[in-house]
Image (cartoon, helix red, strand yellow):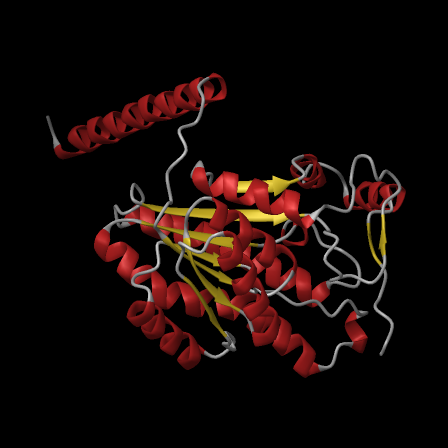
């Protein structure tokens, strides 16, 4: 056989191998629908949560504690953070729980956080990037410093924590990184331009990192989970509207936290909460732009600009 024929045979073999692997992957996905998912045990593992002092972060901390995990609580508001720590230790005195006040926008501060965690508790097994802020203003009213702050807290902080906590996970071949994005990271929303940009960035970051870890052959032990919840009753938004509240309701933070921890225990890669929002996300790519806008107007699902304090 000449060189060209050998290359064609090689390409054909690669394609057949791909088809076979795709078939097995689909078969595995179908079987998993009917087969109960084995949950991993995180008892005794160290879980770090950013934005742990209130809302969703607090609820996740309480749920992780109920699973027997030790906790590193990270929040800029130390008073709130200490309250959560005390609440957990009152219910679970056997756990190791530390609370740190850290400005995770700053990479050097996150580096020091990683060193402190190692000294006080040991290596982190599960990293939950939850901290986030929202401005909720018309784009032309957003001051440059507000845009920068949104991107620093909502995106760069993810990068800094991953940068300093992923390496030990890779070294031991085991770990889990969780990113709390938003439905606003899948579908653009009015008065949320900087917020949507930051949450879209988180989805892209996690998807790209997933590909990178796969390429490096470490994906069997390192798990990534991206969560995209819709609006929650945490006080983050002043005014929220929904024509069909039974379909697209304001979510309860505790219920969302439970779904997130369930997703972590089952090593899910992605979860939209509620799942119907993923349908609307996929539908948006099939509809013409004008139809998309008409549907969004009809659903009346979104937020109003925050009133200036």
Query: Can you give x and y, in whole percent of width and height, for residue 161 in the image?
Result: 42, 66
Q: Which residue is drawn at 40% across and 55% down?
A: 95
Question: Quick one: quadrant of the C terminus?
Answer: bottom right
- Of residues 154 and 196, the one nearer the viewer is 154
- Of residues 26 and 178, the one nearer the viewer is 178
Q: In this view, does 240 lie above or below 273?
A: below
Q: Is residue 52 left or right of residue 22?
A: right
Visible in this render: residue 88?
A: yes
Visible in this render: residue 77?
A: no
Q: Which residue is drawn at 40% across and 63% down?
A: 162
Q: Is residue 217 left or right of residue 133?
A: left
Q: Is residue 5 left or right of residue 50?
A: left
- Of residues 97 and 280, the one nearer the viewer is 97
Image quarter for residue 26? top left
Q: How many numbered discs sit on the rendered protein?
A: 0
- Of residues 106 and 148, the one nearer the viewer is 106
Question: Quick one: quadrant of the N terminus?
Answer: top left
Q: Which residue is drawn at 73% across and 51% down?
A: 231
Query: Can you give x and y, in whole percent of width and height, for residue 27 in the image?
Result: 40, 19
Q: In this view, does 267 lie above or below 202?
A: above
Query: Can you give x and y, in whole percent of width and height, for residue 307 in the image?
Result: 87, 72
Query: Can you give x and y, in whole percent of width and height, for residue 139 in the image?
Result: 77, 71
């Amino acid at each position: 056989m000449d060189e060209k024929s050998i290359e064609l045979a090689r390409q054909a073999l690669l394609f057949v191998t791909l088809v076979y692997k795709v078939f097995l992957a689909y078969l595995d996905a179908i079987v998993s629908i009917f087969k109960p998912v084995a949950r991993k045990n995180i008892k005794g593992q160290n879980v770090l949560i950013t934005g742990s002092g209130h809302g969703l972060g607090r609820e996740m901390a309480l749920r992780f504690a109920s699973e027997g995990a030790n906790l590193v609580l990270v929040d800029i508001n130390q008073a709130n953070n200490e309250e959560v720590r005390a609440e957990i230790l009152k219910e679970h005195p056997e756990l190791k729980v530390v609370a740190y006040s850290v400005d995770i926008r700053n990479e050097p501060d996150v580096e020091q956080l990683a060193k402190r965690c190692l000294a006080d508790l040991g290596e982190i097994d599960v990293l939950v990037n939850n901290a986030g802020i929202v401005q909720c203003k018309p784009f032309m009213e957003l001051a440059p410093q507000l845009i920068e702050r949104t991107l620093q807290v909502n995106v760069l902080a993810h990068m800094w924590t991953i940068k300093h906590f992923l390496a030990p996970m890779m070294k031991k071949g085991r770990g889990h990184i969780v990113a709390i994005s938003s439905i606003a990271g899948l579908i653009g929303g009015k008065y949320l331009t900087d917020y949507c940009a930051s949450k879209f960035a988180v989805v892209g970051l996690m998807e790209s990192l997933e590909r990178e870890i796969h390429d490096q052959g470490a994906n069997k032990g390192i798990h990534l989970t991206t969560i995209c919840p819709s609006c929650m009753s945490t006080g983050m938004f002043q005014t929220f509207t929904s024509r069909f509240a039974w379909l697209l309701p304001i979510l309860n933070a505790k219920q969302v936290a439970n779904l997130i921890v369930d997703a972590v225990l089952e090593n899910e890669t992605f979860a939209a909460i509620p799942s119907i929002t993923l349908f609307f996300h996929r539908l948006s790519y099939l509809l013409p732009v004008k139809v998309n806008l008409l549907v969004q107007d009809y659903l009346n699902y979104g937020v109003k600009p925050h009133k200036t304090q």
